Amino acid sequence: MLPLLPQSATDVLLDNPFQQSSWPYFPMIHSGETDSRSSRSPYLPSPSTPSSITPDYVLSLPSSRVPRPDRPPSNSGGDELQQWWFSTKRNFTVHLLHPFLLWHHRDLMSSLPNEAVYEKEKSGVTWPKQLNAPLEAVDPEIANIIELEKARQWKGLELIPSENFTSVSVMQAVGSIMTNKYSEGYPGARYYGGNEYIDMAETLCQKRALEAFRLDPEKWGVNVQSLSGSPANFQVYTALLKPHERIMALDLPHGGHLSHGYQTDTKKISAVSIFFETMPYRLNESTGLIDYDQLEKSATLFRPKLIVAGASAYARLYDYARIRKVCDKQKAILLADMAHISGLVAAGVIPSPFDYADIVTTTTHKSLRGPRGAMIFFRKGVKEINKQGKEVLYDFEDKINQAVFPGLQGGPHNHTITGLAVALKQATTREYKAYQEQVLSNCAKFAQTLAEKGYELVSGGTENHLVLVNLKTKGIDGSRVEKVLESVHIAANKNTVPGDVSAMVPGGIRMGTPALTSRGFVEEDFAKVAEFFDAAVKLALKIKGEATGTKLKDFVATLQSPNFQSEVAKLKHEVEEYAKQFPTIGFEKENMKYKN
């Protein structure tokens, strides 16, 4: 008798496992190793290691989905298989009873067993084997979430311009044993031993960073330890400025970034604006272009110590030479934040900020297509010859390195630095340049098609990897359109446009081409993507017209109502069928759990 085991689950457990099962894996099975201490089948977990079971995971399954053991490999036909099954099914059933016997002593909402994951057996230590177990065996819940994300990336259209699909080789480096090492300090000057190979990786990463952007190592240096873009910018500010010294940067509603010191009339939003005094420069709202004349006038009055040339939602190229003149007049430092465009700069398909900037920061995962990290480039060597005929050197290197460590960080993420080294090597190839050229060509076609369909583009077009669509002329906002896009498997993001008063209900949508270009999309594909976008906007307008209230939650409720589910499902199906034609990046679609 099995008094605590539901009869339906018993039927599943004792059913013939050779019938086709819809469950794609059995999370409690070892990866084919035979336990030398036991004559049991290697395809079942040992009863002496109950921690290899995931009780709550099994308990949370409906009885129809209790996992079955996989078919064992065999070269001798069905008799051996049947013999294997009848000799092990009882052991398997009893083994699986363990979680049910704990039914009244477990929190059913938890996925963690009460038993210690690492425990000793009489014959010796077992946790090394546990540590080498695959993710599917150790944590099927997280493994399942990853599989769901794979399906989303495969079936959806990724249009967020700050996202990309990094390569398998980069992911292998990021997921490597380089994550195990602590290495406070810099190559050759660490506070921990055992860093000889970490030093090799970081030094190689620095060398490749300079090579990727065609920089002379006598004139430029780079710090590759910054954890992300916003910390990198803050590290530059703290390195080169005193508290409450002045910064100018592009205003957030006009395409700037939070990390450049955004504040409203009533509140300091970014921490940068708390520790430093910030003043924005803006676009000319009639042209959508940066108003360099007004920037120069404002700088004359504000007298900034540092000016940031960089944006997160500006579809045009920066005039670095013009800003350099303003900086020289004010004796200000020019910081170029090329986070969005660094891949295009590395490929040489747009002008480089390195010809004019004193400092250049960038993230590494956007158009550069690396892991999630950041770099800080700084000038070094001779700055000028003074009136006494002596050389004056740049003093950025020590200040920036000290601001990164120990100023604002401890140990660097060595796995990320290793992955970045791989991405930077890729950035010097002919294939990479061809990819970035295609990014620009795709974005130009995307912008053209949107304009032909009557959409207003901020600045009237694009010269880089993104477009910014002003939806206010269509009678709707970016928040509502974003909700509809997401419901049909298109990822874009709402964005402020000139004239907006709220960042929560902005008037624009920001879209870009790097991610889908990585999947192989070309110009005609982005013309089709523009059609999908247009269909989503028209659907959003229809939903807005029938919403019972004026708030976003009223719009979402109407979107989710039965009245619109058929239209949403139809457009979603069209989007998914189109996206599924293209290759996946980082995983094989044949091995996906959720292909249907």
Image (tube, rainbow, N blue to C red):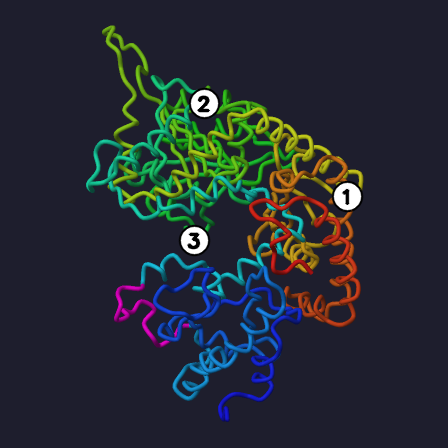
Q: Secondary structure at mark 1?
A: helix
The answer to whether residue 24 is left or right of residue 541 is: left
Query: Which quadrant would residue 127 be assigned to in this image?
Result: bottom left
Type of amino acid at the residue the image marks with label 3: Lys
Q: Is residue 122 magenta?
A: yes
Query: In the image, which is nearer the foreground, mark 1 or mark 3?
Result: 1
* Mark 1 or mark 2, earlier in chain: 2
The image position of residue 173, as x and y in percent, is 43, 42
In the rendered image, the vertical position of residue 264 relative to residue 23, given as above or below = above
The CA distance from mark 2 to mark 3 is 34 Å
Residue 454 seen by the camera: yes
* Mark 1 or mark 3, earlier in chain: 3
Q: Nearer the viewer, residue 527 or 433?
A: 433
The CA distance from mark 1 to mark 2 is 37 Å
Residue corresponding to mark 2: 354
The answer to whether residue 549 is left or right of residue 396 is: right
The CA distance from mark 1 to mark 3 is 42 Å
Residue corresponding to mark 3: 267
* Mark 2 or mark 3, earlier in chain: 3
Residue lying at the far top in this picture: please name it: 389
Q: Residues in magenta? A: 112-126
Dot 3: within a 10 Å radius of its alpha carbon, few (fewer than 14), some, or many (20 or more) residues? few
Type of amino acid at the residue the image marks with label 2: Phe
Dot 1: within a 10 Å radius of its alpha carbon, few (fewer than 14), some, or many (20 or more) residues? some
Residue at x 63%, y 47% (from the top left corner)? 158
Q: Secondary structure at mark 3?
A: loop
Residue corresponding to mark 1: 528
Query: Which quadrant would residue 538 be assigned to in this image?
Result: bottom right
Type of amino acid at the residue the image marks with label 1: Lys
